[in-house]
Each structure stands twice: as C-alpha cells, then as structure tokens.
Image (cartoon, grey):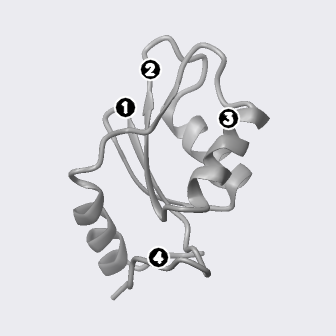
Amino acid sequence: MTLTGKQKRYLRKLAHDLKPVFQVGKHGVTEEFNNQIIDYFDTHELLKISVLQNSIESKDEVALKVSEGTNSTVVQIIGSIIVLYKENKEHKEIELP
C-alpha cells in the first residue's frame, strides 16, 4: 500500500503519543518477531518499534524486513523509532484522509 504525503502526516500525528510496543535488539528481525507483529496488527493499525543500539541491523534494514514480513507500510523512521501502518479490514479504526 502506498500512502500519500497527507496520509503519512495524519498517521504521524496519530502515532505521536504511542509508545514503542516492540524492540529490535541483537537478534535482529526474525520470523517469530514478524509473527508477533502480525498478531498485533490483528487488533491495531498503527505500531511503533524501537531499534536498540545493540541491534545487528540498521533501522532502515529493520523497517524494510518488518514491512515486507508483515505486509505493512513504513510511515516514518525518526531516530531509532519506526512507525508502521497496516489497514485492518475487519476492525478498521483509522480513516485516512
């Protein structure tokens, strides 16, 4: 899914007060990690991930692997925080502009 600039700004605003739910550390992104995120996306549409300093992968690599592994869209990478969005067809909470 490709987001427009306006949609990304809207999602960044919604994600501002969210706390990171997952952390990526020395083990990097694994299949099990992606499966946990897929489960999280069953009930939520917006997610923050924190990339720890001891991570073997860069934040850009983490964002790419997680977005591809979970079929989600990277909204923003700022500092060590990644914001992801995945539309939930059954429990849609966010109406994109």
Which residue is under mark 2? 52
As measured in the structure, the alpha-carbon distance from the residue carrying label 3 to the one carrying label 4 is 24 Å
In contact (CB < 8 Å): disc 2 and disc 1? yes
How far, Cα to Cα, is label 4 from label 1? 22 Å
Residue 33 is labelled as 3
Q: Quadrant of residue 81?
A: top left
Q: Residues within 10 Å of mark 4 (few under 14, many from 20)?
A: some
Q: Where is mark 1, residue-wise?
A: 80
Question: First in sequence: mark 4 or mark 1?
Answer: 4
Rendered residue at 73%/50% (across/down): 69
Where does the image place residue 8, in percent across and percent down from the top left?
A: 35, 70
Badge 1 marks a residue whose secondary structure is: loop
Residue type for callout 1:
Ser
Q: Disc 4 marks which residue?
A: 3
Indicate which disc, 3 or 4, sits on the residue closer to the N terminus.
4
Q: Amino acid at mark 2?
A: Leu
Tags 4 and 1 in contact by the CB under 8 Å rule? Answer: no
User: Between tags 2 and 4, which lies in front?
Assistant: 2
The span from disc 2 to disc 3 (Cα, nearest Å) is 15 Å
Instruction: Looking at the image, tell me whether mark 2 or mark 4 is earlier in sequence order.
Output: 4
Counting residues from the start of the chain, the first of labels 2 and 1 encountered is: 2
Q: Is residue 58 left or right of residue 9?
A: right
Quarter-of-image position of residue 73: bottom right
Decide: is 47 above or below 19.
Answer: below
Identify which amino acid the numbered label 4 is placed on. Leu
